[in-house]
Amino acid sequence: MKIAKDTVVSVAYKLSDAQGNLIEESDEPMVYLHGGYDGTFPKIEEVLDGQEPGFETQIQLEPQDAFGEYDPELVKIEPRNRFPEPLEVGMQFEGTPEEGDEDLDTLIYTVTDVAEDKVVLDGNHPLAGMALRFALTVKEVREATDDEIEHEHAHGADGLEVVDEDEEEDDGDEGASKPTLH
């Protein structure tokens, strides 16, 4: 079966930086609903469209086609007493870019430095500002179910799937993943 709109695609991947340094290699294939549902990056969908299981390719995504440019405005310094103990570099917290502005989307902030009375938080994705190379191998392609099309994501998928948290709670699909790339 060929990859087309409303198919569920399973893809093994290796992710490297532009210099070829391995960032992540999939233990389990990334599974997403193909056809503009934000299940993976649009440039990856474009390359995979019309392909079949066994297809292999490499693609480089520039920052604007992956996790965006690095935005220094998303770095915050907060008072240390606002955070729990123990607090370590690498811990993550959810918040809005502007204090008290609940209309803005929440971001995941990563602790990048801890001082005696201050904490540095970075709301950029850890791979923001980087060109990324993906080595992709299509493992499986199948027709999406009506339920998957209605919810606009592959059920039980792992990988780069983007899931609306409100929708995830409503559809009862405990296997759906959050948008992550380790």
Image (tube, rainbow, N blue to C red):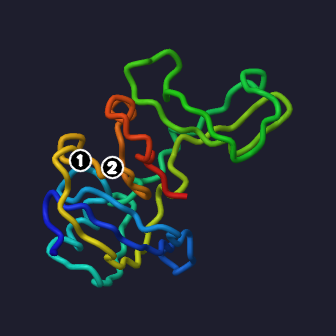
Q: Earlier in the sequence, mark 1 or mark 2?
A: 1
View extreme (top): residue: 100
Which is nearer the eye, 91 or 49? 49
Q: Amino acid at mark 2?
A: His
* Residue at x 49% of width, y 29% of height: 97
Disc 1: which residue? 148
Q: How far from the left and from the top, in percent, is residue 56?
A: 32, 84
With respect to residue 28, does 164 lie above or below? above
Q: Amino acid at mark 1?
A: Glu
Q: How far from the left and from the top, in percent, is residue 14?
A: 47, 75
Q: Which quadrant holds residue 67?
A: bottom left
Q: How far from the left and from the top, in percent, is residue 57?
A: 32, 83
With respect to residue 29, does 163 lie above or below? above
**What number is the disc on residue 155?**
2
Label 2 Cα crowd, 10 Å radius (few <14 / some 14-19 / many 20+): many
Which is nearer the eye, 139 or 79? 139
Say if mark 1 contacts mark 2, CB within 8 Å.
Answer: yes
User: Helix or strand or loop: what does disc 1 sit on?
Assistant: helix
In the image, is 139 to the left or to the right of 7? right
* Residue at x 41% of width, y 73% of height: 12
